[in-house]
Amino acid sequence: MKVAIFTDTYVPQVNGVARTLKRWTGYLEQKRIPYRVYAPDLKSKEEYADHIHRFNSVPFWLYPECRLALPNLMKIKRDLEAFQPHLIHIATPFNLGLAGLHLGKKMDIPLVGSYHTHFDQYLDYYKLSFLSPFVWKYMQWFHQSFKKTFVPSLHTKKELERQGLDNLGLWQRGVDHQLYSPIYKSEDVRKHFSIDAPILLTYVGRLAPEKGLDTLMKVAKNLPHRMNENIHWLIVGDGPLRNHLHSIAPENMTFTGFQDGEMLARIYATSTLFVFPSATETFGNVVLESLSSGTPVVAANAGGVKEIVSHGNTGVLCIPNDIHSFTQGITELLSDPERLDTMRKQARQEALGRSWDEIFEQLLNDYKDVIGEMKLASFA
């Protein structure tokens, strides 16, 4: 089997989709399955190799950290003709996805897709919700040629079915249990960021309107004064709201910028609670990473996140965008250390049940099924 992947986000970009696809190509290498990746050139330090093809790109106006590639169709066509993939996996509905769709149909190569982002929900936060019907019309057209579209959660599957998409399959997410582990708990985190407070509340993710950070800021200022004196917030990530959030942040809040690797693992494991107010997630990789680190989660009861957090066992699910609900959830957990200790153990145990190898094995089998069906159809 040989696989071609078209995506508008790939390492060294720091987001859930890029990291998932990098892990997937790592699995393909482990299985000695040849692959090609077609991705944007980021004009920065990045991975170059014979099997990774980069194209000039421009910033995406709705999501400036991501870039839209300007693909060279003739170059891609020549490479596909030389590579002869058995399947094309399209992970973006934008330029490179359109290139993969066009060439896959033209060259009669089986097509599958994966859906990663609720762009229609993002529109609400940018006062563009009137565009939502057009987005879904486009998504229906774009995905109709795929033999299978993979989604990361049952919630996302139901939403896409409601919008008229079919041939949907589940491609859930795993977590690196060795990296994101309680063993990385370390006082070095407090020393590194000059934190004296005994309670550490952490957010990891993009600093953007759709992540519900207005709610988080209000919650940070709304916690009981006596409790707040012992709390410090770590805001991990970057994005268009960074300067604004800096300007309104309370004194007990530190912005770390992007973090990854062992430093991110130490932050998760050392945190008392992970607070995640986003209501737009198709899955929520950072939530699973926190659980794997043994850190309970206080999150919005929405999207794919509500399938990861077991309310009352591994964390607390709150009413989306509700300041009182989040404040109450945090306060109740911090007021009950014994319950919090139990949750830490349950969080780690829950995450251990999500193995990347099992998830990737299933995706590989789905690939084989699609290729097999295409071969049978050609003989019919």
Image (cartoon, rainbow, N blue to C red):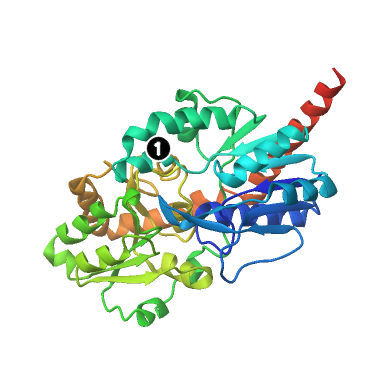
Q: Helix, strand, or loop for circle 1?
A: helix
Q: Residue furthest left?
A: 225
Measured from the top left, where is residue 284 in percent x and y?
Answer: 45, 49
Query: Which image quarter: residue 231?
Result: bottom left
Q: Is residue 81 left or right of residue 349?
A: right
The answer to whether residue 110 is seen in the rendering is no
Up/down of 304 relative to 377, above or below: below
Name the residue located 46 percent from the left edge and 42 percent from the top edge: 282
Q: Which residue is mark 1?
A: 120
Q: Tell me the quarter of the image containing the C terminus.
A: top right
Measured from the top left, where is residue 314 in percent x and y?
Answer: 40, 49
Measured from the top left, where is residue 37 in percent x and y?
Answer: 69, 53
Q: Is residue 38 left or right of residue 191?
A: right
Residue type highlighted by circle 1: Asp
Name the residue located 75 percent from the left edge and 39 percent from the top edge: 87
Measured from the top left, where is residue 147 in percent x and y?
Answer: 67, 29
Q: Depth check: give the residue in front, 370 or 69.
A: 69
Q: Is residue 176 left or right of residue 266?
A: right
Up/down of 106 relative to 236, above or below: above
Query: Which image quarter: residue 64?
Result: bottom left
Report crowding for label 1: few under 14, some 14 to 19, many 20 or more residues within 10 A (C-alpha).
some
Name the residue located 65 percent from the left edge and 42 percent from the top edge: 99
Q: Depth check: give the residue in front, 33 or 76.
A: 76
Q: Tell me the quarter of the image containing the N terminus.
A: top right
Q: Residue furthest right?
A: 379
Counting the numbered discs, the total is: 1
The answer to whether residue 163 is seen in the rendering is yes
Name the residue located 40 percent from the left edge and 76 percent from the top edge: 189
